[in-house]
Image (cartoon, grey):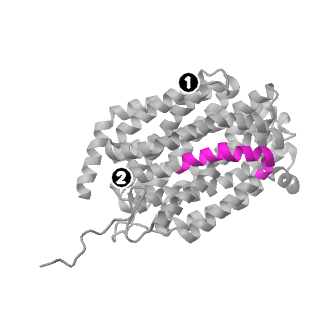
Amino acid sequence: MISLVNTDIKVKKFVGIEVSPDLSRTNFFFLYLNTLFIGMLVVLPSLIQPAFLKDVIKVSPDFFGFTNGFLQNMSQIATLFFVAAIGVLSDKIGRKVLAIIGFGMLCLFYYLYGQSNEIAVAMGISEGFSAKICALLSFAPSRAAEFADFAPGLLMAYLIRFVIGIGFILCFPQFITMVADYTREKDRGKGMALNGIMMGLASIIIFAAVAPIGRKIGVGGLFVFASVLAFVGMVSTWVFLKERLPEIKPGEKKDFKHLFPLVMKSPTIRASYLCCLVGRADINVMATFVVAWAVQRGAALGLTSEAATMKGAIPMIVMGVVSFAAFPIIGNLLDRWGRIPTIIVTLFCSGAGLMLLNICSGPFSGLMYVGASLVGVGISGTVAGANTLATDASPKAMVGTVLGGLNTMQPLGMLFFLQLGGYLYDVLGPGWAFGIKGAVDILLAVWLFVNRKKIYAEMKGAANSAD
């Protein structure tokens, strides 16, 4: 008897990732395109801020390193306050609506960010009050008088940067969670790696393509560019992405109060959280202090802020290109070789790269590019690895919640390493901001190696229960 059932049905794939019947390649394409958009918006402040602080806000050189680091950290403070709650909310109402709201906020507040001085004047913020606040935030309350000339605009920039940070956490974590929603475990490493590829590509585009544009249109033009980009992201998320929340059985739904006990009993989730705490700070440490170092050193060499920013962006381009190229390899290693071995090797790479930056003679040294390349490899492993580990160990009803907790680790790490780095930058020299961070990366790699057997046992048990 001839079977009438077609057993040779071709499975749809998107760059090697199996596409479920209820999804399309278009959904996947715009998931990653929107990840690229939010990645560009997240990276953009690292390019804009040094020149913005120097030429628009006119911050004193004595407080330049710390102020730049703290302004970056406003996003991390916003993340720390809200990302866990947003993770829980995404499990309840969905990922898509939050991303749309986030892009809308970025569209508005990126434009307002460039108008910080004008808004401060319009609101009548006094120099004395704002100087006291800004000096206190810079741990220099006795030097408030030195902040008076630029404090109103700086204080407003801090506030708007905080709101922009809320926009980031409404968008960026949703696209990571949607990768988990869209993929199966066998392809999840590749899916998370592709998410990282988009972030690496975002960094390349910002520092290789947008930086030269910024030299022509100025800092103000870059703020307008950011607003337009956020608007495009909002529309494409609304039109082209499909919500795909996992099916939850009655009684499975859990909230944030169940997260802490889960983390305490799961060595795999703890490992992913530590990777996020330590590893994700590498991007901001590099972007913040390499460009700031270049702008300061460039002034001594007679370079304009725009020219120095563009020259300082070259190591960031190198890091982005290497990270971009490494992500496909890392994705396959995560799925085939294993999550933990891949993460350990990449942590050693980033640690070694940051140590090299510590001994560089300056931001334009050739050694800077070697260190940036190694950090690029490390970033690809820790970003994709942490996301994959956390998703593997998450109950279906708590994927958004667990990833919300994971993303809470990011601001904690960035707050610590950016503030410590800013202090060391001003007091001991720029290289110290990188050296301390590199040492911590290597220590985490050693910790993962020591605890690898516990993580393997849990992951094996999870795989058996899933079968």
Residue 178 in picture, x, y percent from top left = 47, 61
Where is 157 relative to 258, above or below? above
Q: Is residue 64 left or right of residue 176?
A: right
Q: Is residue 138 visible?
A: no
Query: Which amino acid, by three-letter code, is at mark 2?
Result: Asp
User: What type of secondary structure mainly makes up the magenta span?
Assistant: helix
Secondary element at image label 1: helix
Instruction: Tell me the residue that label 1 is attached to.
Output: 356
Q: Is residue 165 visible?
A: yes
Residue 304 in picture, x, y percent from top left = 81, 34
Query: Which amino acid, by three-letter code, is at mark 1?
Result: Leu
Indicate whether residue 296 is drawn in magenta. no
Q: Nearer the viewer, residue 27 or 66?
A: 27
Q: CA distance from mark 1 to mark 2?
A: 34 Å
Front position among marks 1 and 2: 1
Q: Is residue 194 left or right of residue 137?
A: left
What residue lies at 76% left-to-right and 48% top-to-bottom? Answer: 157
Instruction: Tell me the residue that label 2 is attached to.
Output: 392
Residue 465 in picture, x, y percent from top left = 24, 56
Q: Which residues are magenta?
A: 198-221
Around disc 1, counting alpha carbons within 10 Å, would you say few (fewer than 14), some (14 to 19), or many (20 or more)? many
What residue lies at 43% left-to-right and 61% top-to-bottom? Answer: 255
